[in-house]
Image: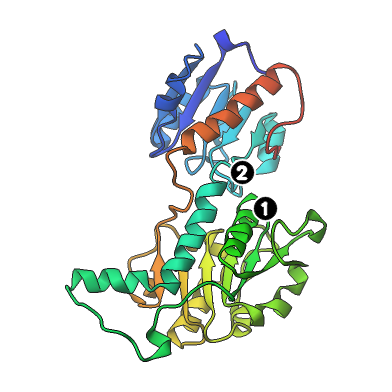
Amino acid sequence: MLPPRDQLTLCFAHVAYRFGDRFALRNTGIRFVEVRDRAGLDAAIGEADVLVCSGLWRNDLPQIAPKLKFVQSASAGTDQYDREVLRKAGIRLASGQGVNANAVSEHAIALMLALLRRIPEARDNQAKRFWRGMMGDFSKREDEAGGKTAVVVGLGRIGGRIARLAKALGMHVVGVRQNVAGGAEGADEVHSFRDLKAVLPRADFLILACPLTEETRHLVDAAALALLKPTAQVINVARGRVVDEPAIIAALQEGRIAGAALDVTAEEPLPADSPLWAMPNVLITPHTGGETHRYEDNVLDFMMENIARLQRGETALVNQIV
């Protein structure tokens, strides 16, 4: 399905990641080109047998890519790729699921601890050179993770590690996943999506780590948010549209939940006029949960294994989508 190494051409297409630099260090002898924008991708795609891509993907690319046989997604999420378009063009697709599992799970825990320890407030006070005194008001005092309940939605590589890290902090972890037969992945108990609303009232932290699918789109809507206790906080390292954004804005503004930490939003970049920017009970990171020094190398490991499989005529890929 793919030509031998000496005839193979790779195209790395990403606005920021340095796939070319990291790949060159491997001394494979495989020809590659690296592009940073859609114009560059349009110019290079016609010669590519393999494409490593994420946000620059467009579903009309197969029309101008006669040699393209394999797309290695640089991201775990693949909702941007039209499966039927790829199938008709005879192009295989594999996701980057797992390349940033450690980074995203650690980011989720960091966000949770930042909310518990009121780190954003401390940073704001530092900028103002303000030394805050001890707090008599429990509602304004720092807190600890031990004994609290985390409801983790999605128990894949990321969600499972979040569950294990939360357990290490002494939390009770309630896992929610599509198929409960997949196992608890370190959670104390596991429930299906249809049981989510039954467990939401128990959550001190609702941590979202599930993929965006038709089933999970707006999974956390106004009705779900209404089931959370007023002291609960929401952490989203999944996809922005897993949450009904107007609904969570309203819940935060009205004090029906205590706070939120969002690494993803419905529209990215988050529009400048979004109320989320100015909310003191909201912590925003710009979809950096998966950022890590090892990102490129982890993706390239998957890509090289999948190229080897395709060259051997194998049909099963690592993280196969199409």
Amino acid type of the residue tagged 2 in the rendering: Gln
Location of mark 1 (residue): 156
Of pointers 1 and 2, the one earlier in the residue sequence: 2
Quarter of the image for the C terminus: give it: top right
Classify mark 1: helix, strand or loop: loop
Residue, x 61% and y 46% (percent of image)? 78
Q: Is the residue 256 above or below the residue 194 in the image?
A: below
Q: Nearer the viewer, residue 185 or 280?
A: 185
Image location (x, y in percent) of residue 197: 70, 78
The residue under the point 66% across, 39% down is 85
Give the colour scheme of this rendering: rainbow
Q: Residue pushed farthest left? A: 129
Who is closer to the viewer here, 114 or 66? 114
Disc 1 residue type (three-letter): Gly
Query: Of circles 1 and 2, which is in front?
Result: 1
Marks 1/2: CA–CA distance: 9 Å
Q: Nearer the viewer, residue 115 or 71?
A: 115
Q: Quadrant of residue 69?
A: top right
Residue at the image point whose x is 38% and y is 34% from the top: 36
Q: Residues within 10 Å of mark 2 (few under 14, many from 20)?
A: many
Helix, strand, or loop for circle 2? loop
Q: Is residue 52 visible?
A: no
Residue farthest to the right?
181
Residue 18 percent across, percent down from the top left: 40, 32
Classify the position of the N terminus by image quarter: top right
Residue ID for mark 2:
97
Label 1 crowd bin: few (<14), some (14–19), many (20+), radius 10 Å: many
Q: Is residue 166 left or right of residue 193?
A: left
